[in-house]
Structure formats: structure tokens, C-alpha cells
Amino acid sequence: MIKKPIFSDGEKEAIREMYNNPDMDLENLDEYSFVSPMYMRRRAEEKKRKEEESVTKFGFIPQRLGITIDPELDNYPYNIMFQSHRYRGDQVMTGTALYFPDLSTFFDFDEESTMIYRNKYGRNSYIVIRHNKSEDSYEAERFVKGESVQLAMGKDWKNIFIHLTMVGLQPGEGCEFS
């Protein structure tokens, strides 16, 4: 007697999708003509996990703030943007977090100046930027839900912001999806 594999409706859909054959007849297969349901279940679960993990991240180099009242303010960015793309099947979900300067937090000391950038989508996420005047170097520390999640340092404008933004969004970070 020939055993027939038994597939759930979800498994049937996953198998047909995997073989790109929506009309595949799964009712008339014997146990040797096809792989086991357990194997197909594992493949479908693995495919789903890979789709959920497939995230593309981008780095951004912002423009300078451009406030001429205080030349030190020109060492700070107009805004800071983080973006990640997630692919689910043939759909792309884009998450974007924008941080804007809180000018009330700007402090200019002899050797260093600092300013905080606040997340447009949630004030519990912010970035502290420090500019070392004598070395013309930067340090940026990123906080999400009030906890430090990233520290980036660099000698020049381009490198500090590439290293800061290229990691994309962090879990729990306020963002807009499109």
C-alpha cells in the first residue's frame, strides 16, 4: 500500500509557493515522489524567518545646521535620519526615524560643545552630539527608550554620520512606517 503525505492547508500553500506552481496537485502524491511534510514545514518556517530578518539599512550624511549667529552651531547637523527597509514577500516596509536639534540643550564650553537631538516620533529616543573644538572631532551617543544603544566617534563630518546612521533603526525606536 502506498502512503500519501498529509499536508495542512498552510503547508500546501507554502509548497505551491516554494515551487512557484499554484496549481500543483498535492493530493495524488505517493511517499516517494515528494519530500516529507515535516521537511516542507521546516522549509516554510525557515523561509518565513528569513523574510522577517531581511532588513536593509542605509547611512545618511546630513547637511550642516546653517545658523550663522554662532559659528559653533554650524558644526552640528540640520537633522539626523535613520532608515531601515524590511522585505516581506514582494512588499517593502520602510521605517524612518528623524531627529531634530533641541537648541535649548546647546552648550558651548572652551574645548567642547554639546547638543541633544530628539526623535520626532518619541521623546524617549535622543542623540547627544559632542564636538571637540581643538581636534575637530565628534562623538555621538544614541539612546532608545532612555538607554544607550550606540556610540560613534569620528574625526570628520562624513565618517561620524556614516558610522552613526548605517546601523539603521533599533528595536523600540520611534519611527514612521511607509
Image: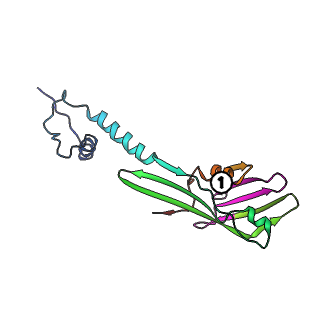
- Between 63 and 122, which is closer to the camera in this rendering? 63
**Is 88 positioned to the left or the right of 148 in the image?**
left
- 38 w.r.t. 138: above or below: above
Q: Residue tagged by mark 1? A: 161
Q: Position of residue 48 (x, y in %)?
A: 38, 45
- Between 31 and 60, which is closer to the camera in this rendering? 60
Q: Position of residue 80 (x, y in %)?
A: 63, 61
Residue, x 12% and y 36% (percent of image)? 28
Inspect this view and state whether residue 149 appears. no
Snapshot quadrant of residue 31: top left
Locate the C terminus and report the quarter of the image it occupies.
Answer: bottom left
Q: Position of residue 147 (x, y in %)?
A: 67, 55
Q: Main secondary structure of the magenta part?
A: strand
Residue, x 19% and y 26% (percent of image)? 32
Residue 128: say if magenta.
Answer: yes
Label 1 element class: helix
Magenta residue span: 117-146
Residue, x 35% and y 50% (percent of image)? 89
Instruction: Please tell me how crowded label 1 is: few (under 14), some (14-19), or many (20+) other residues with Cα within 10 Å.
Output: many
